[in-house]
Image (tube, rainbow, N blue to C red):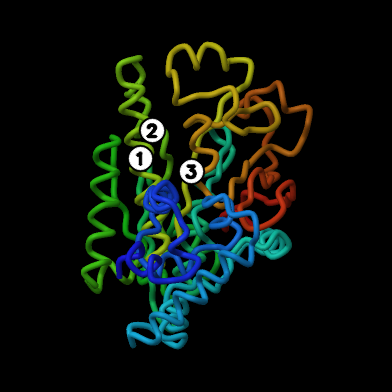
Amino acid sequence: MDLRNFLKQTLRGKELTEYQYNLLAKNDIETVQEFLKADLPKLQILLDIKKPHSVYDIKVELIDLLGKEKKCTFATLYEEEKQNNLDHGTGIEELDKLLEAIGQPFPRVWEIYGEAGVGKTEMMYTFAINFVCQQREQPRHVLFIDCKGDFESKRILQILQELKYPQPDEAMKAIKVVNVFSDEHIIAVLQALLKQRLEKLEEALAIGLLLIDCLPACFLHLRSKNERMLANSQLTTVASLLRRLNASGVGCIVGNASFPRDELGKIIEEQGDMISEDSGGTGPYEPLLGVYWKSVCTLRMSLELPNPEYDDCNIDTVVDDGLRVLNVINNTYGPAGGSCHLCVSQAGIV
């Protein structure tokens, strides 16, 4: 249902400007359902409406209008929302406690960044396994997009065996792996999945979780000054597709790499806008993908070594006891700044 036509039929919606309509479209809010499901604070900030109740009133007017035209009811909206709702946890106890404390539903569009070897891929494996293991009554699948070409099915099987999962073969089949090596390839994969979901194809509808490990690997070939604009454009397309997939009921978790701050100047010179001095990192490491990307995800977390004495050391040169700290950097739904302790083990991240 075209959002603009319906908004113009409401008392408060008709007061919106052309600029505000364009802002909604740029943020992938183009249908009535997408507007009604959008977060109120997000809409308030996006439309620059000072009074929160005004946005709520627009939603109420839309629902009344749709009800009169017999095109929508509270019940149908509730059923659609329930189908898209991912009401399970990550399966990592300490992380689930943290997520509950900061009010972040699992998952919307998340990002996890950290230095090489800190355990980002291990966390992706753990998310995938815990997700499929929780879906016994209504099986749902994971799409694992491997951008580095190093996915290890043997490691997945090892974790399942450590967890004593009764049907490891079935769990492994539920984790669909796609290898991508460029910006164009990952965009094509995401577009195909979205198209198939919109066409209600059963295999695509079964995908409940999308994992990307590790997104910068698809963009690092776009380094020259002439390619920076293309890289940012392609990254914007990826962000839009992830949001639309999430709106259709797919949780998205993106892996991002980080680098030492003391190497920042050299990397900025080499990779331009893909790196930024204000890309939102904390501690001794800075995430890739630049300043724009830090506002894309609803939750941004950094996975780090817990001991301050490691700050000036390469992870490969220290004795690794498996302990990690996960820090909340940005959070759309609640407070940032929280953290929890995790451990890299034979059973994945615990």
Classify mark 3: residues with Cα within 10 Å, few (<14), some (14-19) or many (20+): many
Identified by mark 1, the residue type is Cys
Q: Position of residue 274 (x, y in %)?
A: 44, 26
Which residue bears the numbered disc 2? 217
Q: Earlier in the sequence, mark 1 or mark 3?
A: 1
For the point 36% across and 61% down, which residue is it? Answer: 175
Q: Quadrant of the N terminus?
A: bottom left
Q: Is residue 24 above or below residue 255?
A: below
Q: Earlier in the sequence, mark 3 or mark 2?
A: 2
Which residue bears the numbered disc 1? 147
| Secondary structure beneath label 1 | loop
Left or right of residue 130: residue 76: left
Identified by mark 2, the residue type is Ala
For the point 33% across and 23% down, which residue is it? Answer: 222
User: Which numbered disc covers residue 102?
Assistant: none
For the residues labelled 1 and 2, say whether their Cβ atoms are less than 8 Å apart.
yes
Which residue bears the numbered disc 3? 255
| Secondary structure beneath label 2 | helix
Q: Position of residue 308 (x, y in %)?
A: 78, 31
Residue 150 visible: yes
User: Separation of disc 3 and disc 2 at Cα?
Assistant: 10 Å
Label count reads 3
